[in-house]
Image (spheres, rainbow, N blue to C red):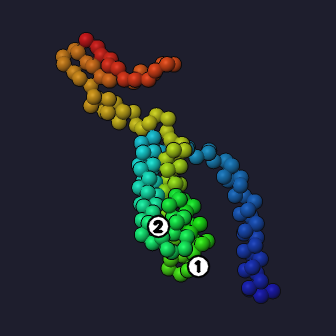
């Protein structure tokens, strides 16, 4: 046999050994520790999605009102699906078609960011314990032995904010 055949046989044998031994090696490891982002990322995601989608929708809305004679431009007032409807009605598939596709993708991306912000699984603690303690200390009023700070009130019939303290 030639050296090329031997190298192919050796490569196949090495691949077979790797496929047989690799699952056993990974099974012996402990599962990785799962970390989720803090809940403070929700608002920036939602605001970013609103800004991105809103900017793209505003451009489409303005184009729709400025050029009503262009085929399909009336559909641009419909968020998310308007650019795709306009693309179907538009006879020009060059630059105008490309811009409609970009607008549709950007609007859908904004909706995706909003959905991600609303549905994202986050850490239940809401962040580091030291950060929460520091934030609570900012709102605390101290004078000698007297301490007072706002606290949330939750019951079956109401939600609100109250003051708690020691003296």
Residue 13 rendering spot, x and y as whole percentages? 76, 70
Nearer to us in this view, 60 or 161: 60
Q: Quadrant of the C terminus?
A: top left
Looking at the image, which residue sits at the far front?
69
| Gap in angstroms between the C-alphas marked 2 and 1 | 16 Å
> Of callouts 2 and 1, which one flags the residue occurring earlier in the amino acid sequence?
2
Name the residue beneath numbered marker 2.
Answer: 64
Percent from the top left, x then y, of residue 66?
A: 42, 69
Image point (25%, 18%), residue name: 147
Q: Nearer the viewer, residue 4 or 134?
A: 134
- Identify the element where label 1 is drawn: loop
Q: Residue at x 44, y 23 (%)?
A: 159
Residue toward you, 40 or 115: 115
Viewer-nearest residue: 74 or 130: 74
**Residue drawn at point x = 40 percent, y = 37 percent:** 128
Location of residue 143 by image quarter: top left
Residue that protrudes farthest toward the right in the picture? 1
Task: Say which quadrant the N terminus sits in.
Answer: bottom right
x, y (%) of residue 151?
Answer: 36, 23
Q: Secondary structure at mark 2?
A: helix
Examine the rendering and report whether any part of residue 131 can be seen: yes
> Where 40 sits versus 71, above or below?
above
| Horizontal arrangement in the rendering, residue 145 relative to residue 81 (left or right) | left
Q: Does 74 sit above or below residue 91? A: above
To which residue does mark 1 refer? 91
For label 2, the crowd category at 10 Å Cα-Cα, with few meaning under 14, some 14 to 19 and many 20 or more, is many
């Amino acid at each position: 046999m030639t050296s090329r055949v031997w190298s192919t046989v050796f490569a196949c044998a090495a691949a077979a050994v790797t496929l047989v031994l690799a699952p056993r090696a990974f099974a012996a490891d402990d599962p990785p520790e799962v970390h989720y982002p803090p809940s403070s990322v929700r608002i920036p995601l939602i605001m970013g999605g609103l800004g991105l989608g809103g900017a793209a929708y505003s451009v489409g809305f303005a184009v729709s009102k400025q050029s009503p004679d262009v085929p399909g431009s009336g559909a641009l007032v419909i968020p998310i699906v308007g650019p795709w409807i306009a693309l179907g009605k538009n006879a020009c598939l060059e630059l105008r078609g490309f811009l409609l596709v970009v607008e549709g993708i950007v609007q859908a991306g904004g909706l995706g960011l909003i959905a991600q912000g609303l549905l994202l699984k986050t850490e239940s603690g809401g962040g580091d314990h030291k950060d929460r303690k520091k934030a609570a200390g900012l709102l605390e009023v101290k004078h000698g032995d007297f301490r007072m700070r706002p606290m949330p009130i939750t019951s079956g019939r109401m939600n609100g904010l109250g003051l708690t303290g020691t003296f």
